Image (tube, rainbow, N blue to C red):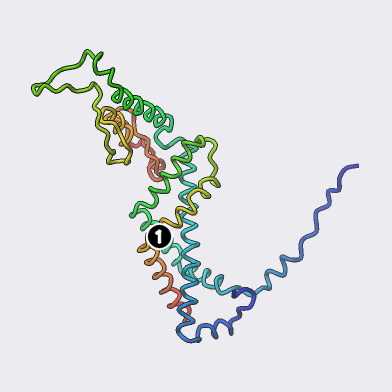
Amino acid sequence: MYANQVRNTDCRRIMSAPDDNITSDHTQLASHFFGELLDSVIMDVASECHRIARLGLDRNLDDEEEELRLSAEARARIADPSNSEVNSKYVVDIFGQTHPAVAAEIFDCMNCGRSIVAGRFAPHLEKCMGKGRKARVKATRSSTAAAAHNR
Amino acid sequence: MRASIKRPPTPDAEEEDEDREPTLEEIINIKLIESGEKERLKELLRERLNECGWKDEMKSLCRSFTRKKGRNNVTVDDLVHLITPKGRAAVPDSVKAELLQRIRSFLHSTAL
């Protein structure tokens, strides 16, 4: 809209126009610059995620596949009634209740928000919050620069 | 015969561009950058988007895309195209309002 025609005199003329005009110009310009800043931030995030993906810094995506598979398996085992009869670990508690070998309740992990079967919660947490035994690989720029070897 | 290795002529259009008057946007952009305000605004935006979990949302989108496509097949372009529309829509109104207000004050203070 302003292309090729704005000279200093034009600038002054626009600036001294009635307040309404200035406000709407400012609003348009502000939106334009906000858009630019946002796109720039989006670019940075995409770049960072790309780097994490390519360098395998995110907790191993293969692990996630494995975990999802095991979780589904656990769920299947619970749903299958024939399992309960065969299971030798079946113990009757003082109320006469029996409990399945794999804790059946499904709830949401408070860390990542995924639906997890209670029986698989411990291994899930291990990976979700950082491995208990293996050293955790942090996927942030600053900590890779600082190098975990400083510990 | 070998193909000609003559260098193509320099396009004249480039000289024309330098004579063109800067647009209002360009003028203000330069002022933003030179005063350091653009960098401050970007940092502010980054901080707000982090605080409200926007960045985590975007990272999670990227992660699930990466899982599906395979981590060595993902390009930056893929991710940019993935999160740009969702990213733009997911900015909280309060964050947008704060940034717009800051930008408007800057415009007000330098334009007059």
Q: Secondary structure at mark 1?
A: helix
Kind of residue at badge 1: Leu
Q: Nearer the viewer, residue B74 or A117?
A: A117
Residue A89 vs residue B7: left or right? left
Looking at the picture, how far across and down is residue A23, in whole percent? Answer: 45, 79
Residue A146 vs residue B28: left or right? left
Looking at the picture, how far across and down is residue A84, in whole percent? Answer: 24, 18
Residue B1 vs residue A104: left or right? right
Q: Nearer the viewer, residue A38 or B11?
A: A38
Which residue: 40% across, 56% down?
B46
Which residue: 34% across, 37% down?
A150
Q: Where, by quadrant of the figure, is residue A74 drawn?
A: top left
A65 versus B99 height, above or below: above
Chain containing mark 1: B
Q: Residues within 10 Å of mark 1 (few under 14, many from 20)?
A: many
Q: Extreme left residue here?
A: A94
Q: What is the quadrant of the N terminus of chain B in the image?
A: top right
Which residue: 66% across, 73% down?
B20
Q: Nearer the viewer, residue A145 or A133?
A: A133
A88 versus A2 height, above or below: above
Residue A107 vs residue B59: left or right? left
Q: Where, by quadrant of the figure, is residue A124 drawn?
A: top left
How many numbered discs sit on the rendered protein? 1
Residue at mark 1: B45
A15 versus A141 height, above or below: below
A49 versus A61 height, above or below: below
Looking at the picture, how far across and down is residue B18, in whole percent? Answer: 67, 70
